[in-house]
Image (spheres, rainbow, N blue to C red):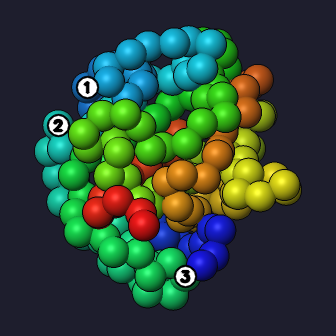
Amino acid sequence: MHTHYFCNDAFSVPECDRIVALAQARALEPAGLVGGQSDHNLRRADVAWLDERADTGWIMDRLIALVADANRTAFDFDLREFAESAQVARYDAVAGGHFAWHSDIGDGPVARRRKLTMVVQLSDPADYDGGLLELMPDANVHVANRDRGAAMLFPSFVLHRVTPVTRGARHSLTIWVHGPAFR
């Protein structure tokens, strides 16, 4: 099994712009944690859930195809559904945007079935400083590609974080894929 998988051209630059615009068509809400908890020491970001936005079906179609290819190529997990909406997150320097080390498998009934996480870089890396997506699947830290439209997929149990954004804002698109418990 691979610890992570890159797709450098998951979305084009115009598609990244369109996704951010769809997310910002209405006010974003403060990001929470599994179970509706909030802890700004752990995570500070604003989010939009794409199932609450119009004209986003094409995004899910693309995500489904990308996940199928990555799972076939790198993971071979027993994946059954997308039980949660895709989420666009904005990590803003003014608000101290970040997400401390964590895994995506949580204590909730849906979060405990997360098996694969995909994060797509939507922002131009010239528009912000910091905001690195880092994974720690072993004793080494791996940094995600910052090119617009690049995706990183990894098992949801892998520790990862978004370092503090110190200038500008970083936007990302995240989806989780669910299945029966790991055995």
Q: Indicate the amino acid at tag 3.
A: Ala
| Residue occupying the point 49% across, 54% down | 156
In this orientation, which residue lies closer to the viewer: 157 or 47?
A: 157
Mark sitting on residue 74: 3
Q: Mark 3 or 2, which is nearer the eye?
A: 3
Q: Nearer the viewer, mark 1 or mark 3?
A: 3
Decide: is 164 above or below 56: above
Residue 59 x, y percent position in the rendering: 29, 61
Which mark is on residue 52?
2
Assign a secondary structure to mark 3.
helix
In the picture shown, does residue 30 fall above or below 34? above
Residue at horizontal 56%, vertical 62%?
Answer: 154
Which disc, if any, is residue 133? none
Residue, x 55% and y 42% (percent of image)?
103
Q: Amino acid at mark 1?
A: Arg
Label 2: how many Cα within 10 Å (few below 14, some 14–19, many 20+): few
Q: Quadrant of residue 61?
A: bottom left
Contact between marks 2 and 1 (CB within 8 A): the answer is yes
Specify the label residue 26 is tagged with.
Answer: 1
The answer to which quarter of the image holds residue 82 is bottom left
